[in-house]
Image (cartoon, coloured by chain):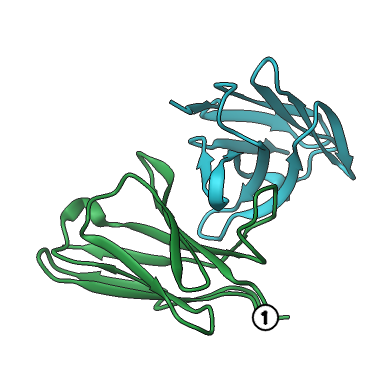
């Protein structure tokens, strides 16, 4: 069974630009969550999608947005990039978003550098 | 708030036992996850505790006390490959994990 895949793996952008990152969950998984990882703040929750609906959102500005398609693939978009957006963006998938514990499987991440 | 605290760094010797502690505010989480992350790689699942007590899984064990807001990860018979960052994460609503800052474990020969 293939794992979570993320594209691209590395990205360099300049301030003010926008970027779109893609995540393909494990086959059969319907929940996709996005996290930002930086040395200073650690792993922080961005948002979670289930069946094409955003179910939960973390404390990030509106420049960060996402969507999920009918095949469960998800994209996140960051507009008007700032230097502080440089980070590793991780996506994680799980089978469902029902209450109760469920292991999230992480992808390898997209390393975004904003110059 | 739902802060999660864990030590920033720990060092141990190959073959030894190490305990990584994690404390959190008692409200808001269904349970606690532990993930391992090697440099440049994705976090990988180690354990999940929702009930009080010790869960053993090979060389790794995890403990939870819900009333005390306390968890620990116990690593036995340390190997060099165990050098990694260990992340404690609270399981909140709708698959939102709140992570601690991670404990960087260095295993020395």
Say left or right for A83 vs B78.
left
Q: How many marks?
A: 1
At horizontal 85% and vertical 30% (from top left) the residue drawn is B54
Instruction: Residue lying at the far left in this picture: please name it.
Output: A16
Residue at position x 75%, y 36% from top?
B50
Chain B takes which shade in the image? cyan
Q: Quadrant of the N terminus of chain A?
A: bottom right
> Which quarter of the figure has residue A41?
top left
Q: Give coordinates of residue B93: x percent, y percent.
A: 55, 44
Q: Is disc 1 placed on a helix, strand or loop?
A: loop
Circle 1 residues within 10 Å: few <14, some 14–19, many ≥20? few
Q: Is residue A87 visible?
A: yes
- Camera-side residue of B66 and B108: B66
Q: Is residue B103 above or below residue B48?
A: above
Where residue A100 appears, as percent x and y from the top left, is 69, 47
The quarter of the rendered structure image containing the C terminus of chain A is bottom left
Q: Nearer the viewer, residue A9 or B78?
A: A9
Image check: A57 left or right of B99?
left
Chain letter belonging to callout 1: A
- For chain A, give the colour: green
Q: What residue did someone put label 1 on?
A: A2
Q: Is residue A92 above or below residue B85?
A: below
Question: Which image quadrant is residue A3 in?
Answer: bottom right
Identity of the residue drawn at 46% across and 73% down: A52
Residue A11: where, in percent of width, then height?
A: 30, 73
Give the side of residue A24 with respect to residue A82, left or right.
right
The front one of A7 and B93 is B93
Tell me if residue A35 can be seen. no
The residue sitting at the top extreme is B68
């Amino acid at each position: 069974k293939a794992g979570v895949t993320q594209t691209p793996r590395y990205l360099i952008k300049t301030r003010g630009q926008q970027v779109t990152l893609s995540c393909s969950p494990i086959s059969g998984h319907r929940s996709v969550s996005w996290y930002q990882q930086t040395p200073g703040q650690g792993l922080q929750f961005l948002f979670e999608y289930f069946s094409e609906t955003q179910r939960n959102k973390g404390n990030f500005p509106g420049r960060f947005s996402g969507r999920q398609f009918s095949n469960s693939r998800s994209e996140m978009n960051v507009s008007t990039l700032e230097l502080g957006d440089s980070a590793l963006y991780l996506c994680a998938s799980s089978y469902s978003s029902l209450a109760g514990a469920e292991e999230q499987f992480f992808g390898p991440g997209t390393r975004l550098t904003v110059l | 708030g739902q802060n999660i605290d864990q030590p920033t760094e720990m060092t141990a010797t190959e073959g030894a036992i190490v305990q990584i502690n994690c404390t959190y505010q008692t409200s808001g989480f269904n349970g606690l996850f532990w993930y391992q992350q090697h440099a440049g790689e994705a976090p990988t699942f180690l354990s999940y505790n929702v009930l009080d007590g010790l869960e053993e899984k090979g060389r790794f064990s995890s403990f939870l006390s819900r009333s005390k807001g306390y968890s620990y990860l116990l690593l036995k018979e340390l190997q060099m490959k165990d050098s990694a960052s260990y992340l404690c994460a609270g399981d909140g609503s709708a698959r939102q994990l709140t992570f601690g800052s991670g404990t960087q474990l260095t295993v020395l020969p």
